[in-house]
Image (cartoon, helix red, strand yellow):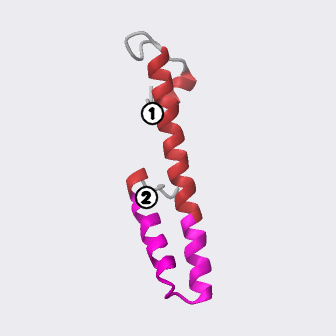
Amino acid sequence: MAGKVKEPSFEEALKGLESVVERLESGEPPLEESIRLFEEGMRLSETCRKRLDEADRKIELLLRKPGGVARETADEADILGKDE
Protein backbone atom coordinates (compact mmCIF):
# COMPACT_ATOMS: atom_id res chain seq x y z
CA MET A 1 0.00 0.00 0.00
CA ALA A 2 1.45 3.36 -1.01
CA GLY A 3 1.97 6.06 1.62
CA LYS A 4 0.08 9.32 1.58
CA VAL A 5 1.78 11.84 -0.71
CA LYS A 6 2.34 15.19 0.99
CA GLU A 7 0.89 18.07 -0.98
CA PRO A 8 3.28 20.95 -1.59
CA SER A 9 3.00 24.13 0.44
CA PHE A 10 1.36 27.15 -1.16
CA GLU A 11 4.76 28.63 -1.95
CA GLU A 12 6.05 25.39 -3.50
CA ALA A 13 2.91 24.99 -5.60
CA LEU A 14 3.02 28.61 -6.76
CA LYS A 15 6.68 28.32 -7.74
CA GLY A 16 5.92 25.11 -9.67
CA LEU A 17 2.95 26.77 -11.36
CA GLU A 18 5.09 29.73 -12.41
CA SER A 19 7.63 27.32 -13.89
CA VAL A 20 4.92 25.49 -15.84
CA VAL A 21 3.53 28.77 -17.20
CA GLU A 22 7.00 29.90 -18.29
CA ARG A 23 7.56 26.62 -20.16
CA LEU A 24 4.17 26.78 -21.86
CA GLU A 25 4.57 30.43 -22.80
CA SER A 26 7.95 29.73 -24.36
CA GLY A 27 6.22 27.64 -27.02
CA GLU A 28 9.11 25.16 -26.98
CA PRO A 29 7.50 21.98 -25.64
CA PRO A 30 5.89 19.67 -28.19
CA LEU A 31 2.13 19.10 -28.00
CA GLU A 32 2.23 16.01 -25.74
CA GLU A 33 4.59 17.73 -23.30
CA SER A 34 2.40 20.84 -23.36
CA ILE A 35 -0.63 18.75 -22.43
CA ARG A 36 1.29 17.12 -19.56
CA LEU A 37 2.46 20.53 -18.36
CA PHE A 38 -1.09 21.90 -18.57
CA GLU A 39 -2.36 19.00 -16.43
CA GLU A 40 0.40 19.60 -13.89
CA GLY A 41 -0.43 23.30 -13.86
CA MET A 42 -4.09 22.54 -13.18
CA ARG A 43 -3.13 20.32 -10.21
CA LEU A 44 -0.80 22.99 -8.82
CA SER A 45 -3.47 25.66 -9.32
CA GLU A 46 -5.96 23.55 -7.35
CA THR A 47 -3.42 23.13 -4.53
CA CYS A 48 -2.91 26.91 -4.41
CA ARG A 49 -6.67 27.48 -4.36
CA LYS A 50 -7.14 24.99 -1.51
CA ARG A 51 -4.36 26.59 0.55
CA LEU A 52 -5.82 30.07 0.01
CA ASP A 53 -9.31 28.85 0.95
CA GLU A 54 -7.89 27.33 4.16
CA ALA A 55 -6.15 30.59 5.02
CA ASP A 56 -9.34 32.53 4.32
CA ARG A 57 -11.38 30.27 6.63
CA LYS A 58 -8.75 30.58 9.35
CA ILE A 59 -8.81 34.39 9.12
CA GLU A 60 -12.62 34.43 9.20
CA LEU A 61 -12.58 32.33 12.38
CA LEU A 62 -10.06 34.58 14.04
CA LEU A 63 -12.04 37.70 13.16
CA ARG A 64 -15.29 36.25 14.55
CA LYS A 65 -13.86 35.64 18.01
CA PRO A 66 -13.20 38.48 20.44
CA GLY A 67 -9.46 38.55 21.15
CA GLY A 68 -8.73 35.84 18.59
CA VAL A 69 -9.36 32.13 19.02
CA ALA A 70 -10.56 31.22 22.50
CA ARG A 71 -12.69 28.07 22.53
CA GLU A 72 -13.07 26.65 19.06
CA THR A 73 -15.24 23.72 18.06
CA ALA A 74 -13.71 20.50 16.73
CA ASP A 75 -14.36 21.70 13.17
CA GLU A 76 -12.69 25.02 13.89
CA ALA A 77 -9.71 23.21 15.43
CA ASP A 78 -9.33 21.27 12.17
CA ILE A 79 -9.42 24.48 10.16
CA LEU A 80 -6.89 26.11 12.47
CA GLY A 81 -4.57 23.13 12.11
CA LYS A 82 -4.69 21.98 15.73
CA ASP A 83 -4.30 18.30 16.54
CA GLU A 84 -6.01 18.42 19.92
Q: Is residue 26 magenta?
A: yes
Please say if 52 is above or below 13: above
Q: Which mark is residue 14?
A: 2
Q: Which residue is mark 1?
A: 81
Q: Quadrant of residue 73?
A: top right
* Neighbours of disc 1 within 10 Å: few (<14), some (14-19), many (20+): few
Q: Which mark is residue 9?
A: none
Q: Secondary structure at mark 1?
A: loop
The stretch of residues the image draws in magenta is 12-41
Please name the residue shown 55% across and 22% down the image: 74
Please name the residue shown 44% across and 56% down the image: 8
Q: What is the CA distance from the residue labelled 1 to the residue labelled 2?
A: 21 Å
Q: Amino acid at mark 2?
A: Leu
The percent position of residue 11, horizontal first and vertical second, equals: 38, 54
- Looking at the image, which residue sits at the far top? 66
* Neighbours of disc 2 within 10 Å: few (<14), some (14-19), many (20+): some
The percent position of residue 76, horizontal first and vertical second, equals: 53, 24
The percent position of residue 31, horizontal first and vertical second, equals: 61, 87
The percent position of residue 5, horizontal first and vertical second, equals: 50, 58
